[in-house]
Amino acid sequence: MKAARHDAAGIKFLIYMVKHLLIALVLTGLVSLPAAANPVRRDHIDVELIPASTSIEPGSVLTVALRLNPDEHWHTYWKNPGDSGLATQITWELPEGFKAGPIQWPTPTRIDVGPLANYGYDGEVLLLTDIEVPRSLPASVPIRASAFWLVCEEICIPGDADLALTLPAGPPAPHPLWSDRIEQVRAALPSSIDGLDVRAQLAGGQEWILSLPRSAMPHSGKLEFFPDEEGWIEYAAPQQTYTADGKVHLRFAAAAAVSQRQGPLTGLLVADPAFAGGQNAAVISSPVTVSESVPAPPPAAPAPAQSQLTLIVALAFAFVGGAILNLMPCVFPVVGIKVLTFVENSRSSAASLRGHGLLFGLGVLVCFWLIAGILLALRAGGATLGWGFQLQSPLVVSALALLFFVLALNMSGVFELGARAQQLAGSVRAQSGYADAFLSGVIATLVATPCTAPFMGAALGFAITQSATVAMTVFTALALGMAAPYVVLSFSPKLVGRLPKPGPWMETLKQILAFPLYLTAVWLIWVLGRQVGVDAIARLLVGMTFIGAGFWAFGRWQSVATSRVRAAARVAAIVLVIGGAVFAWPQADATNQAKPSSLATNIGEWQPWSPEAVVAANQEGRTVFVDFTAAWCVTCQFNKRVVLNKESVQTRFREKGVITMVADWTNRDPQISAALDSLGRSGVPVYVFYAPDSRAPILLPELLTESLVLNGIDKATQPIRTAATRE
Amino acid sequence: MRKLFRIFLAPVCLTAVLAAVAYAAVTPGATAPDFTLTAIDGNPVSLSQFRGKYVVLEWFNSECPFVQKHYTSGNMQKLQSKYTAEGVVWLAINSTNPEHSNYRDPQRSRAIMSQWKGSPTALLLDPEGGVGQAYDARTTPHMYIIDPQGKLVYRGGIDDKPSFSLRDIPDARNYVAVALDELLAGQPVSDNDTRPYGCSIKYKY
């Protein structure tokens, strides 16, 4: 406290010094600041007239800013002040021939005051006015303005001031302190955006629904509308952004007497994050279409919680999440293989070891970029997708199952690939190729997608709502995090030296490691079954058998037989493998019959999720817990078995009257994607409580523990301090 | 904790329900919601007891500069005495919540009104804000006129010059005076739904 005061005194002294220095400069003629009754201090506000240029050029346009700087927590008003309040007014008193334009209002913010809402500026604002300057000027020009304002916090205080500037005629000289700031304010002024097609629909005389193409707002976010005039909308009613039919919609309540209004709906449409062109606020004037009926409330979760992270935090989360990913069950089989490679290569040169580490890292990076690139491209095209989207495709799941099966066969020793076969002497393998290192990076990434590590969910959710550059940066951090342990290991010969010596034990270990891979394949087959059913599984298994036979034939006569026999075996192998792959290929129509694959188990009472069901339950005063999950999400399955279906957890859900719902994202589901978006996430698992009061949804971490969930239940069902107790 | 919650919740819910029920009823032409409030002299006053007369509702907060504009100028008092003399009932309503610094208890309200020489039929206190929200009243002042049949015939601002400057009063078109003159002459109100201006009502929340 004492130190803070000391600081404040120091700052005051500094300001004092700067002021006197400036005065000295002015006196010595180095800076010619205008003389003025300016600035003035009134109750709770500083007011000042600031010219963009400290001299006036004949025949030009001079911008003058009225700077309103109220005390902390006090605000002034926009041109439409909302439910109460009063717009700031400026009356200019200018010499002959000068002409002042209207106030150029910056984008306001909504200020909620209990059941009322105001539009204005919390804190400092610069209101710009352009003044046309005539061709002939006297040597010095007096500019006077009477300003009126209302400044409010809990109470309102009106104020006025007569402000004056005297500027010399001369070539433009940017204001030494303020010209940059004035240009910033001007650049951020709302303007109409070319090609932004906003439709306004008045539904049943009660609700406004504004619609714009998804391409105008590629990153899902929040819209807000500020009407120019009174009588069009209920200022204090919530405004809800949602996506439907490839369009972004904003819905809010119309004013009671809206039917008496005529002409287009005019005002500002503000986007966060920005519109496609980079602007945050658009001036719109939309012709109104009237529809009789009021459509059902939009399917979106209440109170979006996105973009709470800053880029730095998101990058840190992504990196840590990527590193933790290596410990998740999905990546585990691959980790085993990777460690073996290191052991194999531990006797090779440090340079080659580094090369392997880097190439593995590159493989991870490229694969992440590829998946993220496709994901972002598809999203920009309007698809509602999230992390793990590739596993929502039965084709990708089948292909991965086959890949793992073949890898496992390889590790079981059914066949060997390429040059290695010749060197196979039952002992230590020669160095595996660089291509291998790269490919294992790619594979590690592919298998990692079903797992969401702690920290990853928030980072990815952030990434997906940002611009493509930011998103790719976050994905890069994730990839670097995942590759980091191997790269570090490969760069540290000491660490490698600690690994056990290579030897025949490796062949044994390799064959043992084949079994987790078989299990991975089994799991992928189960996912496919969830997605398209038993028939698809049968086809895949038959295909697998053929492929297995093909590789067996390849391996059986690989090194022993005569060249003719070997050639025949290879032809047979190729035919079998291709035939198997074709047979296993999921049928086009099968992918379409994607049905909600109920992941609800018979333990506990899990209802299928829908936004309407959440709203309905909330309206009955019940708290809702939603498990956003997918069959291909290993972390989800782990959490469900180990924590959510535990008797103690289920009992607590029942005791507290919490309705539990499952949102199954195994197949593509735009509604679920939209709900995840609104929670600031882009992948599963997500565990969230929706309380019946107005609180934001309560998110749990990606990795659950029993106590975490129990505490979450208690927190979500405990009433918040009511608004009435607020100050 | 739970009990506390209920105690607070009850009036909040009641207010919300009131507001919801009345929501459709606040536009001109609709039936004005009835209410009973306690006047600063301690007596209960109901809207329904004035059936058969024109009733003006004036949302009031003595600490609001916009209200002060119309009282220090004598503008509001003039309207009150002129129209109550012609048989119009004038109810000033203060919906400021008791925790707000602008709240004035009945005793101080009496002192302020007599100092200003105001002459409404009654000054009513609405500390819960239920009546204010039922009428969708947002500002002080915010004016309403109810006809002898209990229908809302005017709602909106006191005049068309949204400012706090006394100089604007003589030039302003006083919507309430115009509407009352038209009504008393048996004509429909020409501007029956205008923009109110002033301080936000200090509702409980």
Image (spheres, coloured by chain):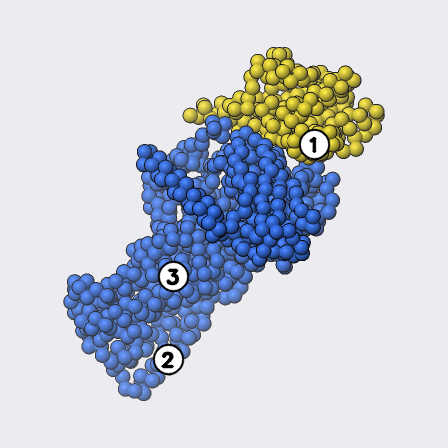
Chain colours: A blue, B yellow
Using a 10 Å C-alpha cutoff, classify the residue at mark 1 as few (fewer than 14 neighbours), some (14 to 19) or many (20 or more): some
Look at the picture and state if B5 lies above or below A545. Answer: above
Percent coordinates x, y for residue A585 in the rendering = 46, 68
Q: Which residue is mark 1?
A: B168
Using a 10 Å C-alpha cutoff, classify the residue at mark 3 as few (fewer than 14 neighbours), some (14 to 19) or many (20 or more): many
Query: Is residue A344 or residue B142 the one in the foreground?
Result: B142
Q: Which residue is mark 3?
A: A476
Disc 2 secondary structure class? helix
Tell me which residue sits at (38%, 72%) in the image: A546
Percent coordinates x, y for residue A659 in the rendering = 46, 38
- What is the number of the mark on residue A572? 2
Look at the picture and state if A448 lies above or below B133. Answer: below
Q: Nearer the viewer, mark 1 or mark 3?
A: 1
> Spatial distance from mark 1 to mark 2, Cα to Cα?
99 Å
Tell me if A606 is positioned left or right of A297 in this view: left
Q: How many numbered marks appear?
A: 3
Percent coordinates x, y for residue A10 in the rendering = 36, 40
What amino acid is at disc 2?
Answer: Ala
What amino acid is at disc 1?
Answer: Asp
Which circle's residue, 2 or 3, is located before the other in the chain? Answer: 3
> Spatial distance from mark 2 to mark 3, Cα to Cα?
43 Å
Chain under numbered label 3: A
Query: Is residue B43 or residue A247 the one in the foreground?
Result: B43
Residue A537 seen in the current view: no
